[in-house]
Amino acid sequence: MSTPEQKALAAPVPTDSDEVGSPPGTLSAILSFTQGVIPLIIAIVALWYFGTVLKRMFGLTGPTVTETEWGRNVYLYGGLEALAFAAAGFLFGREVNRQRAERAERHADSAQRDANSARNAAATSRANGRVNLTRKSRE
């Protein structure tokens, strides 16, 4: 017969990976959506707007555009170009980081399972050692 302490030591330890996910409507689900979809939409809109401004810049080429107007448009284009490149970097970097994060999560889950099995084996060994000691002392 085992004591409650031995049962507690031998019980498997729950991990975060045991949870299936957040139910819809919870704060973590809403934040996940907001952090994932909203920046994606902003990046796509920034790239689209960059394309329309680039098309407009090509339309401004010609003898009718003054140097002052062209200089102002180039100045604005430079700032928008930086935003568009940042958006493109976000889109491409997002995929790379997602792959690295998934790989790290798999590695962490594996390490957690190994730690749990080692902890359970140690608890079982301790429980068996105590049982063996009590049997020897009774004999």
Image (cartoon, rainbow, N blue to C red):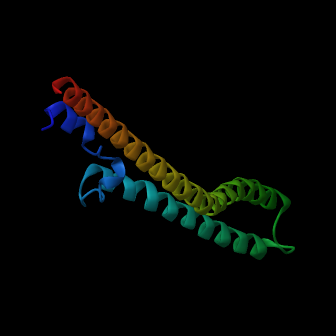
Residue that extends furthest to the top in the rendered view of this protein: 137
In the depicted view, which residue is nearer to us: 95 or 127?
127
In this view, 13 is above or below 91: above
Which residue corresponds to the image point at 69% horizontal and 59% vertical from the top-left?
85
Left or right of 70 on screen, residue 127: left
Q: Nearer the viewer, residue 77 or 114?
A: 114
Q: How many marks?
A: 0
Near-viewer residue (131 or 85): 131
Task: Give the x, y percent position of residue 29.
Answer: 31, 56
| Apparent side of residue 68 relative to residue 123 in the rendered image (left or right) | right
Q: Is residue 102 above or below residue 112?
A: below
Please say if 54 is above or below 130.
Answer: below
Q: Quadrant of the C terminus?
A: top left
- Position of residue 35 relative to residue 50, above or below, is above
Please give left or right for residue 56 compared with residue 15 in the image. right
Judging depth in this view, the residue of 18 and 29 nearest the camera is 18
Tell me the residue at 49%/53% (across/down): 105
Q: Residue 75: x percent and y percent?
A: 76, 53
Spot occupied by residue 36 in the image (x, y as percentages of width and height): 45, 59
Q: Quadrant of the rendered structure where residue 87 is?
A: bottom right
x then y, percent, for residue 114? 44, 47
Image quadrant occupied by the N terminus: top left
Residue visible at 33% across and 37% down in the picture: 125
Task: Classify residue 33 by image quadrant.
Answer: bottom left
Q: Is residue 60 left or right of residue 137?
A: right
Q: Residue at x 27, y 36 (%)?
A: 128
Q: Quadrant of residue 35?
A: bottom left
